[in-house]
Amino acid sequence: MENNTPGKSIFGNLHHVGVIVKDMEKTIAYLTSIGIGPFGMPGGPLFVDIPFKGELRGKPAEWKVKISVARLGDVELELLQPSGGESALQEFLDDNGEGIHHIGFTTNDLESDVKDLVDQGVRVLTSAKSDKGGFAYFETDVIGGIVTELRQM
């Protein structure tokens, strides 16, 4: 059988699974009660509420998201509760309810990888950059139903 494996994938470093929730505290309490966790953020808080300034479908956007994570082996379970502003996460919650939203991968060159995917016809759903890195979610849910994220730490 011929090997048609393309070059190294942009999506080679699985980092987390992102799950949209309606109530962060209630979700953490339930998941912890069945043995998933512990949840928390660097520095000790159970969750953080982070403001973002970026783009949503190519237009400027600002939003806030409550975030908490738990290690599951080599991968994080990332809980996300939209907490203000227009966001892809709030759209997902409104349209679908709670559930798996995306799978997240890390990259060392977000800008280049975004360009490569856009050049292949993949559309950016939402993105934001900071002095510590940034992220981009891609509209890869057209087949399979799951958005992908690239994050530069």
Image (cartoon, rainbow, N blue to C red):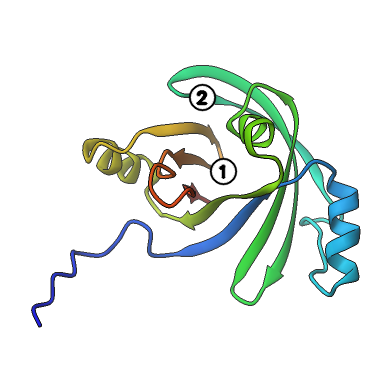
> What amino acid does circle 2 point to?
Leu
- In the image, what residue occupies the spot 42% across and 38% down? 139
Q: Residue at x 70, y 40 (%)?
A: 97
Of callouts 1 and 2, the N-terminal one: 2
Task: Work out how far the residue at label 1 is from the one at label 2, CA to CA, in angstroms.
Answer: 20 Å
As drawn, the residue found furthest toward the left would be: 2
Residue located 68% across and 36% down the image? 93
Question: Label 1 belongs to which residue?
Answer: 132
Q: Quadrant of the N terminus?
A: bottom left
* Residue 31 image point, x, y percent: 83, 64
Q: Which mark is residue 56?
A: 2
Q: Position of residue 38 (x, y in %)?
A: 83, 68
Badge 1 amino acid: Lys
Q: Could you classify mark 2 by the number of other residues whose Cα lies within 10 Å: few (under 14), some (14-19), or many (20 or more)? A: many
Taking depth in this image into account, of 55 and 108 the one nearest to the observer is 55
Mark 1, Cα crowd under 10 Å, few <14 / some 14-19 / many 20+, is few
- Which image quadrant for residue 112? top left
